[in-house]
Image: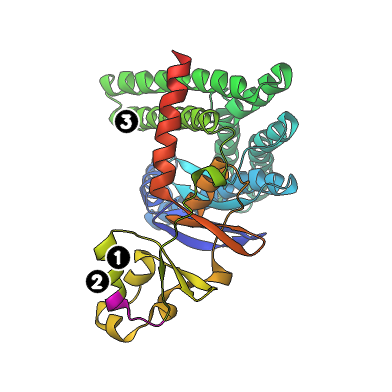
Amino acid sequence: MQQSLRLGTFKGIPIGIHSTWLIAFGLITVSLVYYYSQQYPHWSVGTNVTIGVLTSVLFFISVIGHELAHSLVALAKGIPVRSITLFVFGGISQISREAATAAAEFQIAIVGPLSSLVIGGLFWFLSAVAGNVNQPLAEAFRWLAWINVLLALFNLIPGFPLDGGRVLRSILWWRKGDFNSATRTAANIGKLISYGFIFLGIWEVFQGFLINGLWIAFIGWFLLNAAQANVAQLTLRDALAGIVAANLMSRECPTVPPYISLTDFVHDYLLRTGRRCYVVTEGSRVFGLITPREVSAVPRTEWHTTSVAAAMTPFEKLKWVRPDESAINVMEKMNAENINQLPVIEDGRLLGIISRETLLNQIQLYMTLYEQREV
């Protein structure tokens, strides 16, 4: 997710917080401070605030633990994990691809709720230990025990993309042997559950519970969008099945010499031709690739003294694909690296370039043909 602050890494997995997390943290902290002040009026204001903040922080650490459980099992199954991010609705593990088998999908999905139950049990034990020593701390641990159990139960709701929906998909996938059919069924159930949350939230608003109602409705809206996005991604995979990088690449790779200045490159190449990607070559030697992204990284006042060779991405640092890689892999690599062009390389030779624009045009074409076949 964009706009995230990196907290650190665990097992090579970057962990961060999205800017929207501050909303959730603030709301939960304020709610906890109010709850403690009502339940324990003899506590001081300082105690209420301190325990409220501590409880909120420990809750989000619990959420990270939930997501780490998903991520570590995914890594054990050979699936790379891009990041874990806390945001307004909780946490999300950005796992790079779908599981290869129904069993792996089941294990990755179920371990999250199970970890929350274990964390809940741990906090329940800590509340018992702290009960005779520190009442505020014991109450914080007790709340954390209950909320982690509720988090586990909520995630087990069989609506995709919740963990329960992924568990349901894995079971349907195992029974039917059809990943696409299982995903569509789980996503449709997820949509129904999402609408249920939205209507429940609206009902709560009309009952006078404005904050609770809006929160429930927004959760439903988020789940609905996530379910729809998964169906769209599945349709895209269907439409691009059988298409490889060689089908998408352009063999006409415009070139530019390495020694000219960025000023000359911008005016004589980029603006004059409208092409966005150039291979930096001299004779038969390929040095690298340069696009508007590399140019914009150099202050404009330095363009006339900076050569193309100094600004380019060197050949050995290029992200690239093989000609036989699937179109889905090409798209995922572009998205993961946040780049707009990918060289196609085989045996150290540059065969062509795939641009995001070309990829999107091809996707639109194949999507149109795919949808027509379904009519």
Q: Label 3: how many residues lie within 10 Å, few (<14), some (14-19) or many (20+)?
A: some
Percent x, y for residue 214? 32, 30
Q: Which is more N-terminal, label 3 or label 2?
A: 3
Q: Report helix, strand or loop for mark 1.
A: helix
What's the distance in space between the residues labelled 2 and 1, CA to CA? 6 Å
> In this rendering, is residue 94 above or below 102?
below
Front residue of this view, candidates 223 and 38: 223
* Above or below, 282 relative to 4: below
Which span is picked out in magenta? Answer: 259-264
Task: Estimate the x, y position of residue 254 in percent, counting from the top left.
Answer: 41, 63
Residue 270, disc = 1
Residue 140: mark: none
Q: Is residue 261 magenta?
A: yes
- Which residue in the protein does label 2 denote? 267
Amino acid type at image mark 3: Leu
Please name the residue shown 74% across and 44% down the image: 77
The image shows residue 213 at horizontal and vertical percentages of 33, 27
